[in-house]
Every structure is written in structure tokens, then in C-alpha cells.
Image (cartoon, rainbow, N blue to C red):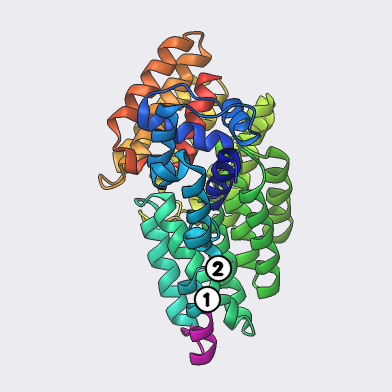
Amino acid sequence: MEIGELIRDLRKARGWSQGRLASAVNEAYGTTLTREYVSNWECSKVKPGGFYLAALSAVLDVPLAVLENEVQRRTFLTDVAGVAIAPVVASDLLSAGFAARLAGGPSPDAWEAKLSTYGTEYMSMGAADIQRRVSGELVVVQQQLDQPRLWSVAARLMTLYAKTFPGSDGTKAVEWYRLAAQAADESGDADTRVWVRGRAAIALGYEGASLGVADVLADQALAIGSNKPSLGLLNAIYGKAHAAALRGDTATAHRLDEQGRRIFDTAGSYEQTSDYAVPYWRLNVFRSLLLARLGDEKGAVEAQEQARTELPEELPRFATHLELHRGLMLARSGDRAGGVAYAETAMAALPPEKHSLTLRMLMDEIRA
């Protein structure tokens, strides 16, 4: 196997885009690797040198000798590729799925408790940790889908799983969001159908990814649940607002912001630290970026200050979001170098294990 093919397979096994792999190397080693250069490696147009082989070894968690030596690569593929390159068919996942089917699996109430735990842990854990654990849960819950209530559980787990993939490449994350929406429909539960679509819409709109899909899912949520204020509806509205802002439709974005604030007054969360909640501080994180994108500096700063008054100390990643919004404001005002420097300083202050896919996408937006 050529080195480029192995790099591609290891990257895809992690659910990473070429840009995400380049970012991982850059963040770990302070380089300026581009997506195009990763593409050249994978197409065997150029081979990575010694420095980049060492970097890839660390970032992709594969022995350096495997990358350097063709014989070692063949041995690696024969002995361990099943686990390293195809984690979804790893023996522990297969055994968990069969064991769940034989035992009947967790009860619906137990699944709801699991969802609550994952919703809390997502706020502070890294995407890779969540992805590995949720993939196992999806293997188990699919053995129990003869119960409509568990289609609702599966749909919400799929939505969380989608968040662990980069949205910018418009493939894996969107594929899972669409699948989650279909699973929600199987549940027959309107609240789940609205929430899944709304959560996908705000994720894509906030990240500035696949805006057409964000709009479609948001519109579906609005059609299903327009008569009942809910967190799903709130997320859908802000997903559409971010998409409008990124397209330059200022009037629509402001109108949706006002609509979202009215819904929040009825449906806002008391729960502070769950991905399934939208408390006041998180609403203002949504609004901070939205208003920064719209060039409303006064409104954005006010939203940032409001968010900080209630942001839990144990969630430093979201404080970094607010700092990146300020970097975006600087860049949009004409001080691109200052905005990038401000944002990079904020990212450097956050421990690398707390960095998220969304933060990296915000950095790309500021640099652009």
C-alpha cells in the first residue's frame, strides 16, 4: 500500500476531512499545512518528509515505522487494520450489539438517563471521546428499535454523534443529521422531530457549514412545531438566522433574532450544562456570534457580557467561543491581523484537549 492510501484510510477512520487533518498537525506542531497539501499526499503526488511523517505518526496514532516502511505497512494492515481503519466493526462493538439483542437491552428510562449524561458530558469532553462512546451506544440501541420510544433515543444520539464530525466538508455530519431526522420521524414524537432538526440547523448555521441543509432542516422544524414554543424551535430559528447573516441578509437575520428571543422567554432552559438545553448564557453565545457576523458591535459585546454573567466556570470552551467572536469583530472591522492574533491567543489559552471542531471552524472564518 502506498503511504498516501494509508494516510487517507487512517484519516477517514477518524471521520476527519483533509482540512481537519491539516489543522490537527498545525495545532500540534505550529506548522502551516494546507488541505491541498494533504490531498497531494493522499493522491501520491508528493510524499511527506521526515518531519511530517513524525507529525502524522503522533496525530493519527500510528507507529512511525509503519509510515516509513512499506513492509511495516503491509504487516500493520494484516495485523491491526481491522481495528485501526474500520472501528465500526471492532469486536467490542459487535459483541455489545449482540449482547444487547440477547438481553433485551436497557429500558427506555435507562436510555433517557444515558442521554442526559451524554448531554452533560458533551459540553466539556472532546469530540473524539464522545464519538467513540456514542458509536457503541448506537450499535446497542439499533437492536431495540421495535419500540417507537427508542427511535426517539436513537435520533437524539445520532444528532449528538453528528456533532463529532466536521461540518465544513458537508458530508459526514450532514449525512448523520439527515439520518437522525428520519429516525425522529419513526418515533412519531413531534417534540423529537423538531428538536433533532433544530439542533442540526443551529450546529450547521453556527459553524457556517452546509447552509442550504441548515435552512431545509430548520424549515422542517418550523413546519412541524410552529404552534408550540420549544428548544427545538429556538435552535431552528437561530440556525436560519446564522445562515441569513452569512449570506448577507441582515434584515432576515435581525427578524429571526427577535423571534428567537420571544420563544426563549417561554421555552428557555433552567438546566445550565447540557447539550439538550438552551439557558440564558447559551442563547447569548448564539447571539454573540450572530451579531458579530452582522457587524453589530454594540449588540455583540452586550451579548458577550450577558453570556459571561452566567457561563459556568467548568465550561471554558464556551468562554473561548466568546473570545473568538471578538476576534471576528476585529477582523470584520478591517483589522484582520489583529482579529486573527486575538483569536489565536484565546485558542492558545485553552488546553488543546478542550479544542472543538466548531472552534477550529470559527478560526478558519476569522482567518478568511
Q: Quadrant of residue 255?
A: top right
Q: Is residue 29 above or below residue 217?
A: above
Tell me if label 1 and label 2 are in contact, CB under 8 Å: yes
Q: Nearer the viewer, residue 247 or 2?
A: 2
Q: Determine whether, in the image, residue 84 is placed left or right of residue 143.
A: left
Q: Residues within 10 Å of mark 2 (few under 14, many from 20)?
A: few
Residue range (magenta): 97-107
- Report how far apart the C-alphas of labels 1 and 2 lie in the structure: 6 Å
Q: Determine whether, in the image, residue 292 is placed left or right of residue 117.
A: right
Residue 355: x and y, percent?
Answer: 38, 39
Please report whichever mark, 1 or 2, sits nearer to the chain's N-terminal start: 2
Q: Residues within 10 Å of mark 1 (few under 14, many from 20)?
A: some
The residue shown at (69%, 27%) is 247
What residue did someone put label 1 on?
94
The residue shown at (51%, 8%) is 334
Residue projecting furthest to the front: 71
What residue did someone put label 2 on?
89
Instruction: Identify which amino acid the numbered label 1 is placed on.
Output: Leu
Question: Visible in this render: residue 188?
Answer: no
Q: Is residue 96 above or below residue 28?
A: below
Residue 168: x and y, percent?
Answer: 61, 38
Q: Nearer the viewer, residue 135 or 311?
A: 135
